[in-house]
Image (cartoon, rainbow, N blue to C red):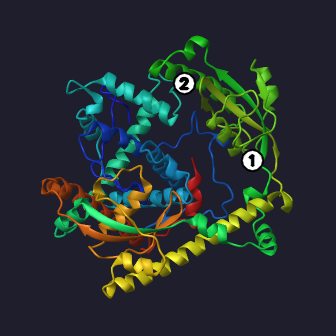
Amino acid sequence: MKFASCHDHVFFSRPQLELVRFMMKFLRSQSQTVLIVVLGVIGLGFLFYGNAGNLLTSPGGHISSDYGRIDGADLSVAELYTAIRNTRYSAIISGHAQQLSQPGGKALIAQEAWRQLLLLHEADRLHIQISDQELIDFIRKQPLFQKDGVYNPDAYQAAMAQLQIMLRIPADGAADPLNSIKQTFADVMRDSLRANAVSSALLTTVRGSTQDLSSQYEKFYGPATVSLISFDPKTFADAAQVTPEEIAAEYKAHPLNPDYRTKEKRNIDYVFFPLTPDQAKLTGKDKAAAIEALGEKALDFALAFQPEPTATSATPPTPPDFIAEAKKRGLTPVTTGFFAADTPPAGLPPSTSFNQAAFDLTKDNMISKVIEMDNGVAVLHLAEIQPSDLLPIDQVKDGITKALRQAKGLDAEQVAAQKAAQALKAAVAKGTDFKTAAASLNLKVETLPAFVPGKVSQTDARLQVIAFEVSTLTPGQVSDPAPVQSDDSMLIVSLDSRAKADPAGLTNFATGFGEEQNQRLRSMVYLDWAEWASKRPGTHKPPDLDAYGGIE
């Protein structure tokens, strides 16, 4: 479709589906802040400047060409890849980039992408379509694209320019350089609105019970006095014994443990496209525009190493030599020398994007995307890999000993805490005071001043754990052992007393707690529905679904 004079299409989602379990956050309509978050629901299947050839990062190593099936229709690789990229961009823009780097993050993205595909299929089946005019009308109502309460084309244009930089979509060569991002934005927002119509029908009637709101309010906001017992992991680790046989067995069993190996190092050729000194002083949109212009120049260089799109030969032609091609174009190639993933190359300031791009390269994908750095952009070429080697056991023996002691200490700590909790619960159940029971077990008790669990500082990890345990207890109850992740300690908490909460806060609590409860239930319904839909006749997930979560 072509774009109208209003600079066209956006979609703002009312309660949007959770991206994965760590994204269980529904969006509210008519909010400029939330609209910015909704930009994360954009499906943009492009890399920084282009999506051709090896500039497209692929997961590699997949043995199956089965990309899934929904109601008897096979999915294409393009459909699967697009869905995964859409979900990944949504997570990043919504502020969940850190979660994606956690173990299992890529698999979660792939699973959510599959669920989104199921929703879109339901939209097709129900003939849910969104007209151009509906999208155009909706954009005029969004505060982000308004000025003084009226739709403003310049505001929309500025937002699209910012989005283009954020998601690294190449400028269009037509009269409107933002045409590519606008078209992508419109197409994907249309799908998002269709999926939202299905999810709204599925989830909006799901509501939790309000009967226990008052009880929950008292547990969170009634001032509480607690006694507790702490188990220090260091005490148990210091007492742990490690034998030479255990050290040798650990070394032999885990030869790929990075702590037992030298670091892989890489030698990289690169061409840097710098901002001029005057451009480097720019800020905001002006600097972004300068970076974008450099990106176009860098993209032209990067594309020289990609096979021609029209090539029909089964064997693609050999790409040009990186150094020679750079010199032919009047560019200055530089070779870094060997460096590790966590250290900057010699002669370059620290750059996370440079190092990440360098260590993402493979022998089958030796040219990087265009990467943005502080004062310019660069294209990288993998020159050589110095592989990681297993260190002699004598060089890592001390580290193995320390790690084994810590592991044994944690195990011993958990066993001791579990036994103590069982003994304390049994004694308290028979009428013995918590402190008296602890003294009989030679356990030291700490009593905290009264505090309100719902108002503890978010930066105090230990008190956060105690507050959570208190919210689950009634006066006189003893908790199970509770781990404190910040220091690996274990706590056993006894709720000594709880005073009445200030009733003035009940109304606000009921609203927030009720919505949180509804969100939790909606998430469960959504996940259960997707699991059911995945098992219908003629439908199955791709066998390698989780592995595709690494697509960028």
Say what secondary structure mark 1 lies in. loop
Can residue 76 be seen from the camera position used here? no
Q: Is residue 88 above or below residue 299?
A: below
In the image, which disc is placed on residue 364? 1
Q: Is residue 229 above or below residue 87?
A: below
Q: Position of residue 107 (x, y in %)?
A: 54, 60
Which amino acid type is shown beneath numbered disc 1?
A: Asp
Q: Residue at x 30, y 32 (%)?
A: 144
Horizontal side, residue 290 vs residue 460: left or right: right
CA–CA distance in space, label 1 to label 2: 28 Å
Q: Residue at x 38, y 74 (%)?
A: 479
Q: Position of residue 371 (x, y in %)?
A: 62, 33
Mark 1: give few (<14), some (14-19) or many (20+) Cα within 10 Å. Answer: few
Residue positioned most to the bottom: 430
Which amino acid type is shown beneath numbered disc 2?
A: Glu
Residue positioned most to the top: 278
Q: Nearer the viewer, residue 396 or 514?
A: 396
Q: Is residue 189 above or below residue 444?
A: above
Q: Nearer the viewer, residue 401 or 516?
A: 401
In the image, which disc is placed on residue 292? 2
Q: Position of residue 28 (x, y in %)?
A: 26, 47
Nearer-N-terminus badge (1/2): 2
Q: Nearer the viewer, residue 392 or 341?
A: 392
Q: Residue at x 54, y 78 (%)?
A: 415
Q: Is residue 359 above or below residue 63?
A: above
Say what secondary structure mark 2 lies in. helix
Q: Nearer the viewer, residue 96 or 546?
A: 96
